[in-house]
Image (cartoon, grey):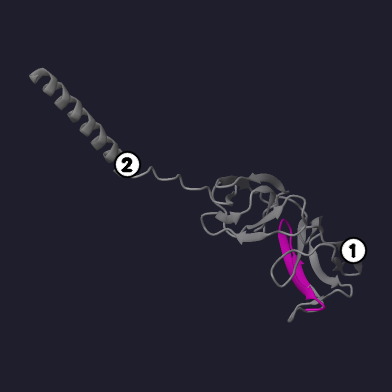
Amino acid sequence: MRARTDAMNRSLLLAVTAIATLAGACDEPAAPNPEPLPETGAVNVIVRDENDALQGAAVYLYPAGEARPIATATTPVNGRVTFDSVPPGDYELRVTGPIGFVPTGREPIGVLRGQHTNVAFTLEPTPPTSPNASLLVRVTDPDGAPVEGIRVRRFLTSATLTSRTDQDGMVYYLYIRPGDYYTELLLDEDWVLADGEPLQKYVGVVVGTTVTTEWRIRRAAD
């Protein structure tokens, strides 16, 4: 009889222990859910010359194949800029200036959700020993976005040359004869000069230098 009682007591103890274990397990906090990935990514750009970080370079971020950039930035002393909150997809980067450096072509990149895309550019200086010079013309709207297809006329004494801005709003007169140049814009009815812009701009171009002339225009309907 005593042995049977002891067995019953052991069974009861095991049952109580099991119930307590289950209750303790239920009281444990649930494992936290992992943090969801951000919906966008980021693009980190560093611009250098042959020796060090380059200040004053303009960096443009374009959707792949598009003429208009969705973001622009100018490099500070450390040569670094970051474009945050960029939707995933295919993009292109382009870097221009500062004066004395050759602009880059478009560099294709991909942006992934929740990740940083790191890109480095090294700009080549304009050859200082060149007997010629270069004149760059940049045309932008009031928001600083480049305007494609604008006719630009360049004068050197009696010689003239007319060109159209590319998808980056640029016209490149490379390795031209040094001298005194005038530029003007031949605008169609959709565009007018921004407030304060003159009808012509004068610039002196000397040997071995690259000079940039900036024009700002706006929509005639604005």
User: How would you classify the magenta stretch by its main secondary structure?
Assistant: strand
Q: Nearer the viewer, mark 2 or mark 1?
A: 2
Q: Secondary structure at mark 1?
A: strand
Quadrant of the drawing holding the N terminus: top left
Numbered label attached to residue 161: 1
Which residue is denoted by mark 2 in the rendering? Answer: 26
Q: Quadrant of residue 25?
A: top left
- List x then y, in percent, for residue 160: 90, 66
* Relative depth, front residue between 193 and 162: 193
Q: Amino acid at mark 2?
A: Cys
Magenta-tinted stretch: 202-222
* Relative depth, front residue between 134 and 88: 88
Residue 18 lies left or right of residue 76; in this view the side is left
Q: Residue at x 76, y 58 (%)?
A: 168
* Relative depth, front residue between 24 and 88: 24
- List x then y, in percent, for residue 38: 54, 51
